[in-house]
Amino acid sequence: MPWAREVVIFDENIARATTLASKFIDRAVVAATLENLLERDSLDVVIIATPHVNLATIAIDAITHGKHVFIEKPGAITYTEMVNVINEANKFHSVVRVGYNHRFHPSLKAAREIVKSAEYGDLLWVRGQYGHGGRVGYESEWRADRRISGGGELLDQGSHLIDLTRFLFGDVDLVHAELQTSFWAMSVEDNAFFSLRPRTGGFVWHHASWTEWKNRFSFEICLERAKLELVGLGGSYGPETMTLYKMSPEMGPPSAEKFEYDFQDLSWSDEFADFIGAISGEVSYGATLEDACETLRIISEVYSK
């Protein structure tokens, strides 16, 4: 954070906080308690990166202390929790963003421009896949404990798929969902299959999986006169690419133009820069509390069935 004048870190594990603080050389200090951190008038921004069960509670605490807040996704574990965060943010005039960083991947940004241009007509359908394999002992980690995580793969990577669908096409409604615990011995789902219907038209089918074994991201967008195929996110998900297939007037095999992006994933740093810009009143593309609330509305609807 080259722009930061002061960095204060709190973690219940003091040793872990101290290790993180050491990476900032002489500009970071460790707070003894969360309250000690929040009471510092010199701090303007609080970043919350905790297990899901603590996100909303700490966010409200930070907001009521007059801070602008960046919350890791999903921002809360229920729709009701997120509504409470929104109410407090409005009351205290806090700028808050939720960490749906995939909005800042270059392939997704390019796809949004193409969709918004309407050059290739209306949406017909979307097919999304997002998944990874676990680690030895994955069933004992906090994400596998519903009391801490609030849900499984639907809330984890499935929430990204829902947010991206809204980012590209606007508000959606749930059509159907099926959750499965196929492999891991855990109290939450390791696979989520669900379909959405954008209110502007078209149909969406997504699969989020903790049993993909090989990390995978694929997002296909079929328009009336073209198809976009987005694959990879950089890093372990493979090179990020977007292929544009353009229908010819006589139909038949389409032309194909492939765009390749840097292997390094800069979406997190771009997202945070967008958040800082939003505090200054600049146009922001990051996920707002209202965006996160709509994603949680869909997820809560699935979990309530």
Image (cartoon, rainbow, N blue to C red):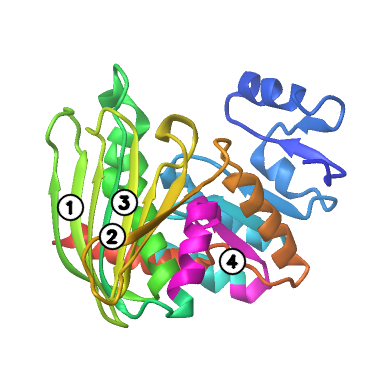
- Mark 4 vs 2, N-terminal side: 4
Q: Which residue is mark 4?
A: 285
Question: The residue tagged with tag 2: helix, strand or loop?
Answer: helix
**Which of pointers 4 and 3 lies earlier in the amino acid sequence?**
3
Are the two marked residues, 3 and 2, in contact with CB atoms closer than 8 angstroms?
A: yes
The mark that comes first in sequence, 2 or 1, is 1
Q: Amino acid at mark 1?
A: Phe
Residue density around tag 1, few if under 14, some if 14–19, many if 20 or more, within 10 Å = some
C-alpha separation, residue under disc 2 versus residue under disc 1: 12 Å
Question: Which of the two marks, 4 or 2, is nearer to us in this view?
Answer: 4
* Image quarter of residue 89: bottom right
Locate residue 105, reporting x and y percent: 53, 51
Residue 35 in the image: state x and y as whole percent: 68, 44
Label 4: state its secondary structure.
Answer: loop
Q: Label 1 vs label 3: CA separation?
A: 9 Å
Asked whether 66 falls inside the magenta stretch, the response is no
Q: Quadrant of the N terminus?
A: top right
- The residue carrying mark 3 is 158
Residue 49, image x and y in percent?
Answer: 55, 42
Which span of residues is magenta-colored?
90-115
Which mark is drawn over residue 263? none
Q: Residues within 10 Å of mark 2 (few under 14, many from 20)?
A: many
The 10 Å Cα crowd at callout 3, few under 14, some 14 to 19, many 20 or more, is many
Q: Residue 104: say if magenta.
A: yes
The residue type indicated by label 2 comes to Ile
- Tell me whether the residue at label 4 lies in contact with that at label 3, contact meaning CB atoms closer than 8 angstroms: no
User: Who is closer to the viewer here, 112 or 96?
Assistant: 112
Disc nearer the start of the sequence (1/4): 1
Task: Kindly check if marks 1 and 4 are in contact, taking CB atoms under 8 A apart as contact.
Answer: no
Q: CA distance from mark 4 to mark 2?
A: 22 Å
Looking at the rendered structure, the kind of residue marked 4 is: Tyr
Asked which quadrant contains residue 83, the reply is bottom left
